[in-house]
Image: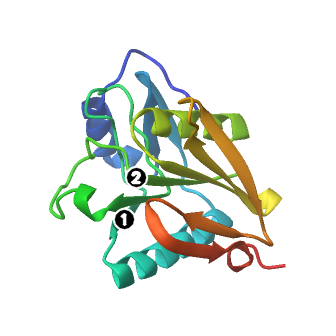
Amino acid sequence: MAIQERLYTVDDVWQLAQQPENELKHYFLIDGELYWDMPPGYTHGRIAGHIFRYLMNYAEAHDLGDGSVDTGYFPADDRHTLLGPDVAFFRKENVPPANHEKFVARMPDLAVEVQSPSNSLAELRRKAAIYLRHGTEIVWLVLPKRAGVEVWRLGDNGIPASEFIARDDSLTGEPVLPGFALELQRLFPR
């Protein structure tokens, strides 16, 4: 849901998010336009939680990096764009400091957005393009109703391209998570 009064910055969103009346709102910005979502439902949270657990178990076992959930990220050169992926992962050399309290001025290496009933696929694809344009290498758009994942990357021509991975296949993390594979049946049981 867009709520526009003026062009907003990440600093404005930080201030809004600190107000008690906004504690259940998840804000994000696209080109200075302010949006918010309510907290997601159980299916969304379950899937995001499992993805985070699988990613982190693998990353810790192979000393590859660190991740987060529901954290705000913005491009260092664009204070009018702020996204909060459901799950984010950084390679070891890109991990923000552990004591960083505010939004992070860098997009994650891998971003995961789980579709909620309130998200259109067009909205998620728009976010995927924004992540990729600002340095994210892989975006997973998890589509519970389709029991699959759209994997987005920049093509050789610099244009975002996707492939759909269905329930009976595995999701990989190359090149961000070398060797990682997740059987999607673990996320979408029959």
The residue where tag 1 is placed is 67
Colour treatment of the image = rainbow
Mark number displayed over residue 151: none
Label 2 sits on residue: 109
Q: Are marks 1 and 2 in contact (CB under 8 Å)?
A: no
Assign a secondary structure to mark 2. Answer: loop
Q: Give the CA separation, mark 1 to mark 2.
A: 10 Å
Task: Determine whether, in the image, residue 49 is placed left or right of residue 75.
Answer: right
Badge 2 amino acid: Asp
Q: Residue at x 46, y 69 (%)?
A: 178
> Residue furthest toward the top?
6
Task: State the image coordinates of residue 184 (x, y, percent, origin top left).
Answer: 70, 72
Determine the residue positioned at 56% across, 44% down. 153
**Residue 40 in the image: x percent, y percent?**
59, 57
Camera sees residue 86: yes
The foreground one among 27 and 22 is 27
Q: Position of residue 104 (x, y in %)?
A: 27, 46
Name the side, left or right, on which 142 lies relative to 134.
right
The quarter holding residue 106 reads: top left
Point out the image quarter for the C terminus. Answer: bottom right
Q: Residue furthest right?
A: 190
Q: Earlier in the sequence, mark 1 or mark 2?
A: 1
* Quarter of the figure with residue 144: bottom right
Q: Residues within 10 Å of mark 2 (few under 14, many from 20)?
A: many
The residue lying at 75 percent from left, 53 percent from top is 164
> Extreme front residue here?
156
Q: Amino acid at mark 1?
A: Gly
Image point (23%, 59%), residue name: 93
Q: Secondary structure at mark 1?
A: strand
Q: Residues within 10 Å of mark 1 (few under 14, many from 20)?
A: many
Q: Is residue 118 visible?
A: no
Asked if residue 157 is positioned above or below residue 155 in the image, the reply reads above
